[in-house]
């Protein structure tokens, strides 16, 4: 394994090399600026949006609006997805009841539900949150169910032979064994929630990073499109690192058993 210092060097070198290649492609006119602005141009646009806002609204209002939508949907998806995943993993009859409905909707992309959600819930916050929740919940549920299934049967039998009650078997054996899968599901769901954010904010309104991206693309302001993309990417990176940091302290036994 690489040392911590060399690992950090690789982490920092990869984006730097990408930026250098990007800057070289634009500097030598290998790509048109309207299609791919130079990093310096995007940096200037980012500074302008941070200091002046976008469409008369502070960028922090756009960020806060998007964060509220994503976090609300993600927390709901985590609660419902983990609960359903545990139930499906523990009880075959519940899994049998849920199998066909969830397997039917799972391959359907969230964008396909946008017209229905507009008809059912309008173009307000409910539709935006539910579009994100729908896909994130499926990801969490499937990973949680897989985590329950991954629990070694011999550990369950050993706990029962020692007199553990069904609740103790679940809480002391099954749930800890499934947590690594749950954490993976939460990380994937968080990334999915951010990726669907832009689509959900196309439903209407004048707030949010998805609005910034869609509005800027309408007027061919490519640099501002990249500003919205960069901000979503930074939010995703920070949120993923925070989730991973927390998970390593909660699931501290992962890879040690």
Image: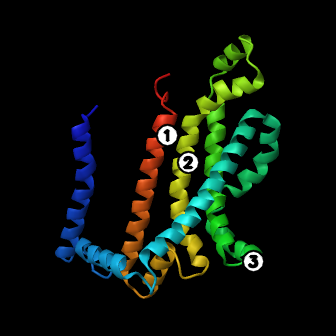
Image quadrant in which you'd find residue 164 = top right
Q: How is the image coloured?
A: rainbow
Q: Does 132 sit left or right of 243 as displayed?
A: right
Dot 1 alpha-carbon crowd within 10 angstroms: few under 14, some 14 to 19, many 20 or more: some
Q: Secondary structure at mark 1?
A: helix
Q: Which residue is mark 1?
A: 247
Q: Which residue is mark 3?
A: 119
Q: Which residue appears at 46% of the width and 27% of the height?
A: 255
Q: Which residue is mark 2?
A: 186
Tell me if residue 223 can be seen.
no
Q: Which residue appears at 49% of the width and 30% of the height?
A: 254
Q: Position of residue 190 (x, y in %)?
A: 53, 54
Q: Single out the residue that lies furthest toward the top.
A: 162
Disc 3 vs disc 2: which is toward the camera?
Answer: 2
The disc, 3 or 2, on the residue closer to the chain's N-terminal end is 3
The disc, 2 or 1, on the residue closer to the chain's N-terminal end is 2
Dot 3 alpha-carbon crowd within 10 angstroms: few under 14, some 14 to 19, many 20 or more: few
User: How far apart in space, not on screen, are marks 2 and 1 (Cα)?
Assistant: 10 Å
């Amino acid at each position: 394994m690489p040392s911590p210092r060399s690992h950090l060097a690789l982490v920092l070198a990869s984006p730097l090399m990408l930026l250098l290649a990007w800057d070289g492609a634009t500097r030598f006119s290998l790509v048109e600026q309207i299609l791919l602005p130079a990093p310096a141009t995007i940096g200037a646009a980012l500074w302008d949006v941070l200091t002046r806002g976008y469409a008369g609204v502070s960028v922090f209002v756009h960020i806060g609006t998007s964060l509220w939508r994503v976090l609300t949907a993600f927390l709901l998806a985590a609660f419902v997805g983990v609960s359903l995943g545990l139930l499906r993993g523990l009880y075959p009859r519940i899994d049998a009841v849920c199998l066909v409905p969830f397997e039917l909707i799972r391959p359907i992309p969230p964008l396909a539900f946008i017209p229905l959600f507009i008809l059912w819930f309008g173009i307000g916050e409910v539709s935006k949150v539910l579009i994100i929740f729908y896909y994130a919940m499926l990801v969490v549920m499937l990973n949680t169910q897989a985590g329950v299934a991954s629990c070694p049967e011999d550990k369950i039998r050993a706990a029962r032979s020692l007199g553990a009650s069904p609740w103790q078997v679940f809480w002391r054996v099954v749930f800890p064994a499934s947590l690594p899968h749950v954490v993976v599901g939460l990380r994937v769901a968080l990334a999915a929630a951010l990726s669907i954010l832009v689509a959900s904010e196309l439903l209407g309104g004048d707030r949010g990073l998805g609005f910034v991206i869609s509005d800027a693309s309408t007027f061919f302001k490519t640099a501002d499109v990249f500003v919205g993309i960069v901000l979503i990417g930074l939010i995703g990176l920070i949120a993923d690192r925070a989730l991973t940091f927390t998970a390593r302290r909660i699931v501290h036994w992962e890879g040690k058993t």
